[in-house]
Structure formats: C-alpha cells, structure tokens
Amino acid sequence: MKQHHKLLLALVAGGALGIIFHRFQDVQAISFINSQILNPVGQIFLRMIFMIVVPMVFSALVLGVLQLGQGHLLANVARKTLMYTVFASTISVFIAIGLVNILKPGIGFQINKEAIEQQSGSLSDIQKNSADTKPFSQIIVELIPKNPIESATKALSGEMLPLMVFALFFGFALSLVLRKNQEGPLVLFFEQVFAVCMKIVDFAMTLAPLGVFAIVFNTAFKHGEGFLSSLLFYVLVVVAGLLIQQFVVYTALLKYAAGKNPIEFFKKCREVYLYAFSTASSNATLPKALETAEKELKLPPEISRFVLTVGSTANQNGTALFEGVTVLFLAQVYGIDLTFSQQVMVAFMSILAGIGTAGVPGGSLPLIMILLQQVGIPPEGLGLILGADRFLDMCRTTLNVSGDLVITAVVSKGSEPVTSSKTKG
C-alpha cells in the first residue's frame, strides 16, 4: 500500500473510531488506551518532526540564500515571494468578507453561554497571549534577534521569524564571503545538517500512519460528532472559502503564473496535504513539503528551500481567510454592524495577522482576539467557535501548506539553477 493510502486510511479510521468511542468516554479501559497509549504515540510522532524543525529551517534558509546570492537571484526571488504572498493573502481575505456578507452565517445565531463558560480556561490563556502582544514598532525591532540561540529555543512558540531573519543575514553574508560556486567547510556542514534532518524525517515517516491515526482519534474522541453541529453554517462558510482559494485562486496561479497543470500538481502534493491536515501545523509539515517540492515537483532546491521555509511562517492564506470569516461572523452574532471602512481594516489586519501567525496548532487565536477588540466585539465571543477550531485549524493549515507550494512553483517559473549539483543536497 502506498504511503498516502496508508495516511488516508489512518485519517478516516482515526476519525470514525474516535467518534464511535466518544460516547464511551466514561469507560475506564477506553479512556486509558486513549490517554496512555494513543496520545503518547501521536505526540512522539509530532516531536520526532518538531525536534528537527529548527536546525532544518536554519540550514535550509542559509543554503537557499547562499545559492541565490551567489547566482544574483536573491533580490528577485525575495521580491516575487513577497509579492505573491501578499497577493494570495489579500484575495483570501476578500473571499472571506464576500462570503460572510452574502451568506450571513451569524444572523440569528443563538449565543450559547454554556459553551463560553466551558471554554473559560482556554479563553484566559488566549487573552493572556493577546495581552502580551507588543506594539508594531517593537515587533519590527525584535525581528533582529539579540541572541539567535534564544530565538532558536523559542522558535516553536511563535518566535520563528527572528531566527529566520538571522538565517537570511547569515546566508547572504556567507554568499559575499565565498566566491561564486566556492564550497568551504561551513557550506558542507549546513548541507550535512540538512541531509541529516531529512533522514530523521524518513524515520518519523515510518511511524506516520500510526501517529496520524492516534492524533485524529484523540481529537474525535474528545469532541465526538456533535462539536460542529451548532456551528455548522459557520464551519461551511470557512470551508467554502478555503475551497475557493484552493481550487480557483491557486488553480489560476498554477496555470497562468507557473505554467503548470493544476490537477497534476495537486495530485503530487496529496501526501503533504494529508500530513498538514493531520498535524494542523505548517512547521511540522515543512520537512515533507521540502521533500515533495524537490523530488515530486522537481522545483529548484535553492528556491524551494527559501520560499517554503519563509512561507511556513509568513504565508498563511488559510489563516488570514479564517480570521476574516471569524471576526465578521462574531460581529453578526453580537449584532454589531461593521462599516465598510471597519471591514477593510479587518481585511488589512487579517493579512498582517496571517503573515505573523505561528505555524503551530491554534497559533491564530490570540491574533483573532486582538482583532475582535479592535472593532468592539466582545472577546469572550471567541469561546463560541473554540469547539470547531481544531477541525478548522486542520483545514486552514492544509491551505497554508498548499499556498507555500503554489507560490514556490510560481517563483520558480523561469528561474535557472544557480548552483552545482553538489550543493543541492
């Protein structure tokens, strides 16, 4: 059986069995198996991937920037990456605003105070995280890390961007120190670090079907089939927006900007999509995305390493769309009529928030709370949608990862290889 078939089977089986056994949560044996066996298996699988994300991101970015810098393509690739990232995020947010204004999923929605009270613990954590958010000027300053080692230790807690900035500076400076196509011991070191990280990913992939089953079973076991029922219309609006972005916007970009067959492209990426959906983490899916870009899509490594590593944090189209839908949905629920200018502000802030969101499960929630406060929506309203957030997190992460690969293909269009075969790892 092919790997993507195993993953799909694990995904479906985990969800179905989790829903079935949800009603038997009080049975001690079943609860024990979930908490003491399946949950640790899922966490071990994720930790095997997360433990190499920091060295892999750093080595991939350094090598990508080095190779692009030596080939004098860095400025062009960075410009195209930023341009298409902002373009795709802008389109996704306006899709969100259009759908919510047309379908009005929040009109007539009955506020469930019990749901908000049950989520009070989660809300207090989110509120604390949003309160810790720094002014924009301070965020810009802190993109330049005083201590890159400290940034590396906090990278998976939302501090990935400073580490990436250091890697960009380091790679660019290295490209200036080394002559064109010169390969010193430092280059060989980073190549081997990257290769070792990918080998560890291969180890993790042997556990992937069982890990995916455990993660999905745990989610379904906790929530059952009813966790979406009260929010079904809202969930459908979010999913519809994500599907439009995937099959209309991304299809157009692939066909007209990248010159690729969208169907073939999506088919080659199906394994990455399954990983993204299962883990709900762009960072955890990054190793598989890098492997797919180079081996399946045949994209230039020097470009894919740069665009995908930056994109895992900076290109969050699905998150931006989700944030736009959620803010306008909650405005409708509370009967707050947002003006056109306020909706434009929501769109702009959703784009910025999407770029700054941590690539980990639930990373967008503190930023949504900030958005709610900006337009006068009670922040405790976020408790209404927390029950459906895990499923929507899985969906929007899949779109985020897909967007990274699409933009990589677009940026790679017309770019010639700039490095020797040895440096491609």
Image: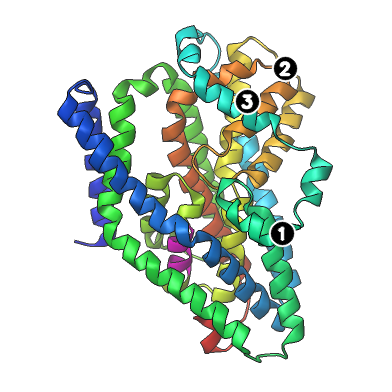
Which label was assigned to residue 127?
3
Name the residue located 42 percent from the left edge and 73 percent from the top edge: 295
Q: Name the residue located 62 percent from the left edge and 90 percent from the top edge.
A: 183
The residue that appears at 47% across and 72% down in the rendered structure is 294
Label 1: how many residues lie within 10 Å, few (<14), some (14-19) or many (20+)?
few
Q: Which mark is residue 147?
A: 1
For label 1, the SS is: loop
Point out the tag, 1 or 3, that comes first from the N-terminus: 3
Q: Residues within 10 Å of mark 3 (few under 14, many from 20)?
A: some
**In whole angstroms, how far apart are the C-alphas of marks 1 and 3?**
27 Å
Identity of the amino acid at label 2? Gly
Question: Which residue in the structure is indicated by mark 2?
Answer: 376
Instruction: Specify which label sits upstream in the sequence, 3 or 2.
Output: 3
User: What's the CA distance linking mark 3 and mark 2?
Assistant: 15 Å
Tag 1: amino acid: Asn
Q: Given the current orientation, which residue lies at the most extreme right position? A: 137
Tell me whether the residue at label 3 lies in contact with that at label 2, contact meaning CB atoms closer than 8 angstroms.
no
Residue 291: in magenta span? yes
The magenta span reads 286-293
Viewer-nearest of discs 1 and 3: 1
Mark before the other along the chain sequence, 1 or 2: 1
**Marks 1, 2: nearer the viewer:** 1
Does dot 3 land on a helix, a strand or a loop? helix
Residue 54 at x, y = what percent? 55, 61
